[in-house]
Amino acid sequence: AAASSDNPSSKVYAPYTVFKGKAALSVSPVLPTFRKLDSGGLQLDRRGVMMLNIWPAIGERKYDWEKRQSFALSATEVGSLLTLGPQDSCEFFHDPSMKTSNAGQVRKSLSIKANADNSGYFFSLSVANNILKTSERLTVPVTSAEFAVMRTAFSFALPHIMGWDRIACQLSAGVSYSTKAAPLVKDMEWDR
Amino acid sequence: AAASSDNPSSKVYAPYTVFKGKAALSVSPVLPTFRKLDSGGLQLDRRGVMMLNIWPAIGERKYDWEKRQSFALSATEVGSLLTLGPQDSCEFFHDPSMKTSNAGQVRKSLSIKANADNSGYFFSLSVANNILKTSERLTVPVTSAEFAVMRTAFSFALPHIMGWDRIACQLSAGVSYSTKAAPLVKDMEWDR
Amino acid sequence: AAASSDNPSSKVYAPYTVFKGKAALSVSPVLPTFRKLDSGGLQLDRRGVMMLNIWPAIGERKYDWEKRQSFALSATEVGSLLTLGPQDSCEFFHDPSMKTSNAGQVRKSLSIKANADNSGYFFSLSVANNILKTSERLTVPVTSAEFAVMRTAFSFALPHIMGWDRIACQLSAGVSYSTKAAPLVKDMEWDR
Amino acid sequence: AAASSDNPSSKVYAPYTVFKGKAALSVSPVLPTFRKLDSGGLQLDRRGVMMLNIWPAIGERKYDWEKRQSFALSATEVGSLLTLGPQDSCEFFHDPSMKTSNAGQVRKSLSIKANADNSGYFFSLSVANNILKTSERLTVPVTSAEFAVMRTAFSFALPHIMGWDRIACQLSAGVSYSTKAAPLVKDMEWDR
């Protein structure tokens, strides 16, 4: 299967960012990539994610982006966030070295906890690195209004990181007209 | 009425898939087809569906796609899923041979049942084939987070499988400008 | 202000229709029209609506489209439907001859009532015509699942019938880049 | 970094407006602007807003647009509105002269209060201008149905005023194909 090359020049940067006393948090969707099939069709290759970054404050209204920790939320993890009630919590664990010889050496976790008065959530990103013998934890309080922005923006972005907007685009591109002998829907259920 | 031909080469494959112990489940929208009218307009021809596949595990992390069972959810069946509460259940019945001489010979049912602790749902797809004397049942547990992904993705896809995105596209394509003597909305209610 | 002409040939027909024992009901969005300003901009001219039709059954699975009654739901009336709880009801009144000499001669009303067991709604469209001395009432039961389809499709269509998708398209079309001396948001609040 | 110029001729005007006894209220999204990077990418420059205007009635069905007061809701303020329950209230404060020598001279506040019978909200916009020695307050009652329209339209518009629709467009534009040696998602979490 052929594969066309990336075009990094067309990248768009529009993260949603909240700046708080001890750290800043930003979220931004990363789109999936597709592989061109010999048939001419497109096959989802690398899944998209919702990239979350937290980076520490190093002075009044100054934040050090070089010290950021990243966490790439999968579609299903985004689903968890979308269903989070005002008193709920959730936690995700990632191992960036999974399936390599360094597996288990670095452990990342993102925890999202409703705060005591239900006025929002604490986002805490912990990274324990056995190789560098480091352990970091960055926490950002997120208000209900900010979480509502995330929820709405994540709902918008989810079909995009899943690649479903591509499926929808087929139509707009003018294909998918029926032939006179169009197969019926029930035929699809037979189709195996 | 004329009908242009399908262009299978532009197909996009991006199903949402969950792999569980005994089987895997995937969902993927299938767009409607349109028929070109003599007036130049487009008429919805074959409705779109949400195609659901379940196929069995045949070893550790190995699944046999050839043994898949398919179920094509209509717009209204997708509507049922969208309103499903955390303790609700629903079941759909399809007869792929409906209105043929084999009607009633094959019966498919998809049941979606909240599990005991409300942490998700069981998707069970049963196929009873009187001709082949076979009866199969494949079940996949779906977590709340995974169901939230489906709910959000189904909400996104529903207008597309209904063909309503096409209606919306008319605008983008630059038509629908008003003439100086544009009819009022109330005229539309007289228009029969 | 100039106005370009309609292009009826590009019309797309994709109503969502439910067929019941005594009548059928269909809903379909009608897009707004825009007027071209001398500045080159576009001004919303005629608002879009959600067109609802009910037409009677005249035999088994036969329906008479010629006998249909229409009701054009405004954006705000669509808003009412979107907030309708499982036990709620609402009713809208239209006078298709409003502001003409025939005002008050024809009265249309659409009532949407939750049914007794909360499993859906009754849509009733009444038309009393004092001129023709006629009075009609067509009622269609709509299940929760069908109403969920409407709710999701109406939420999708609402920004389109308001013309807000056009606003969004500006961006996609590549305009709205900032100049070096871009005005700040706070300037906008001064801007009168 | 280069910056292309604005194209005001392509502006689209489609506010959602409600006319009430003492004043009218309109809301309309204002898109963000982007700055072209030397890499060819796009960087969000000026954030988009939801522009709210209230202007007074000066007679029966006559309203004076010249006397309007404006309030530019940020993404997070829109998030507040989206989470507003039927009995909730919220208030936002803006200083259009913030960070200038006139800071604190003009104070604007928008308050949104559920009315007594939970049938809607009061939108009140107050502007106290110490320089002109003026103080104005304009209030518009908004029904639940009208608020539902705003909620749905704001949910649609939010990703657009955040610039996230641009990110989604990358895909449609045909980029983001994977190379044969596509980086894995986990690599992204290492990428700093």
Image (cartoon, coloured by chain):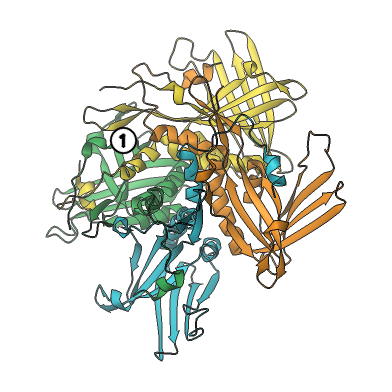
Chain colours: A green, B cyan, C orange, D yellow
Compared with residue D42, is residue D167 higher up or lower down, i.e. above or below? below
Q: Is residue D141 left or right of residue A48?
A: right
Task: Residue under label 1, please give it.
Answer: A13
Identify residue type, mark 1.
Tyr
Q: Residue at x 52, y 74 (%)?
A: B92
Q: Residue at x 24, y 31 (%)?
A: D40
Q: How many marks?
A: 1
Q: Nearer the viewer, residue A21 or D178?
A: D178
Q: Position of residue D8 (x, y in %)?
A: 44, 21
Residue A87 in view in this figure = no
Q: Nearer the viewer, residue A191 or A155?
A: A191
Q: Residues within 10 Å of mark 1 (few under 14, many from 20)?
A: many
Q: Is residue C109 left or right of residue B102?
A: right
The chain letter for the residue carrying disc 1 is A
Please identify the quarter of the rendering in which residue D145 is found: top right
Compared with residue B184, is residue B162 higher up or lower down, i.e. above or below? below
Residue B125 in view in this figure = yes
